[in-house]
Amino acid sequence: MNTGTHAPGVPPAEARGRTEISDRVLERVAALAVTEVDQVGGTAPRLLNVPLGRGTTGTTPKVSAHADGRLAIVKVTLSVTYPAPILQVVHRVRDHVMARVRELTGLDARQVDIDVARLVHPAEQERHVL
């Protein structure tokens, strides 16, 4: 809590320097926050509509982010597991990303754009190309 006072002989925090959080770190924080929400996954590369590697549930969603002062803009591309209610899942993701970005970076993620690129059926998660 900031009471407006500081220890004698120690300059206030704003006079001691500044902290910058790179866009790459912000992207990683947001991507990990997305993975903490149930019923979402990444967007694995596909060949003939079959995921390459381990499918979409084991991959990290695509995230881009930019910090502008104390504000963060985040863009997420993810998949949702069928038959999850897409709008509810997206709202949970957005709220969770906003909260985790604020908690872990101190930045205010006022804009979190989400693109649902795939709807993944549970049976599809088992198929993959090695």
Image (cartoon, grey):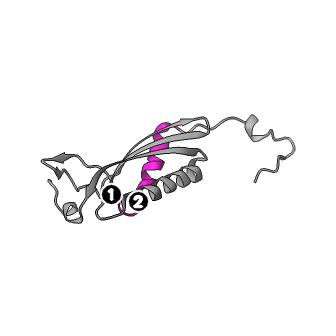
**Distance between the alpha carbons at the discs numbered 1 and 2:** 8 Å
Disc 1 packing (10 Å; few <14; some 14–19; many ≥20)? many
Q: Which residue is mark 2?
A: 89
Whole-percent x and y of residue 59? 31, 53
Q: Secondary structure at mark 1?
A: strand
Q: Amino acid at mark 2?
A: Val
Q: Is the residue under label 2 in contact with that under label 1 (CB below 8 Å)?
A: yes
Which part of the image, by quadrant, shows the N terminus? Answer: bottom right
Residue 58 numbered mark, or none:
none
Whole-percent x and y of residue 84? 34, 64
User: Does residue 34 appear left or right of residue 121 in this picture?
Assistant: right
Q: Residue at x 58, y 39 (%)?
A: 71
Residue 123: quadrant of the picture: bottom left
Q: Amino acid at mark 1?
A: Val
In magenta segment, residue 25: yes
Whole-percent x and y of residue 53? 20, 52
In magenta segment, residue 64: no
86 or 75, which lies in front?
A: 86
- Outermost residue on the right side: it is 8
Q: Which range of residues does the magenta coloring cover?
A: 22-40
Residue 80 numbered mark, or none:
1
Q: Residue at x 79, y 40 (%)?
A: 12
Please say if 29 is above or below 64. Answer: below
User: Which mark is first along the chain, 2 or 1?
Assistant: 1
